[in-house]
Amino acid sequence: MIPDQRDVAAPSAADKFDDEHYPAYTMGRAAEMLGTTQGFLRSLGEAGLIEPQRSSGGHRRFSRYQLRLAARARELVDQGTPVDAACRIISLEDQLHEARAHNQRQTQDDNQR
């Protein structure tokens, strides 16, 4: 599932370390970690794959979850897949993962009855 903007009431510092959706990384740091350009990250936002949160100063901030999606996009683009197609593939992969997890939970619930 594509990350949603979480409405969490002021998480503690310890919670932020474990929260994969906490926007801890700046645009520059995210690009450096992924070995890509800031423009590539912006293109993923324009394609709708990731929607970074904004700091109070208006700067983009990325979560670990978003960086994993961006890393997968980079992998596909490096293999020759156009950015828009890579974003669609990743969205479909994410939907499939969520559906499988849902089915597994349903099967477990059914087995417990």
Image: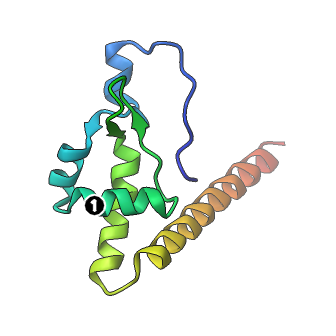
Q: Which of 105/89 is in front? A: 89
Q: Which of 68/58 is in front? A: 58
Quadrant occupied by the C terminus:
top right
As drawn, the residue found furthest toward the right would be 113
The image position of residue 14, as x and y in percent, is: 32, 17
Q: Which residue is mark 1?
A: 39
The image position of residue 30, as x and y in percent, is: 23, 48
Vertical arrangement, residue 24 with respect to residue 98, above or below = above
Q: How many marks?
A: 1
As drawn, the residue found furthest toward the bottom would be 80
Residue drawn at (54%, 20%), measured in percent from left and top?
8
In the picture, measured across the screen, residue 111 lies left or right of residue 20, that is right
What kind of residue is marked 1? Answer: Gly
The colour scheme of the drawn protein is rainbow
Q: Secondary structure at mark 1?
A: helix
The image position of residue 88, as x and y in percent, is: 54, 72
Residue drawn at (34%, 44%), measured in percent from left and top?
64
Packing grade of label 1 (10 A; few <14, some 14-19, many >=20) is few
In the picture, measured across the screen, residue 59 lies left or right of residue 84, that is left
Vertical arrangement, residue 102 with respect to residue 15, above or below = below
Residue drawn at (62%, 62%), measured in percent from left and top?
95
Q: Which of 60/93 is in front? A: 60
The image position of residue 58, as x and y in percent, is: 36, 32
Q: Quadrant of residue 83?
A: bottom left
Residue drawn at (35%, 57%), measured in percent from left and top?
42
In the picture, measured across the screen, residue 33 lies left or right of residue 96, that is left
Vertical arrangement, residue 79 with respect to residue 65, above or below = below
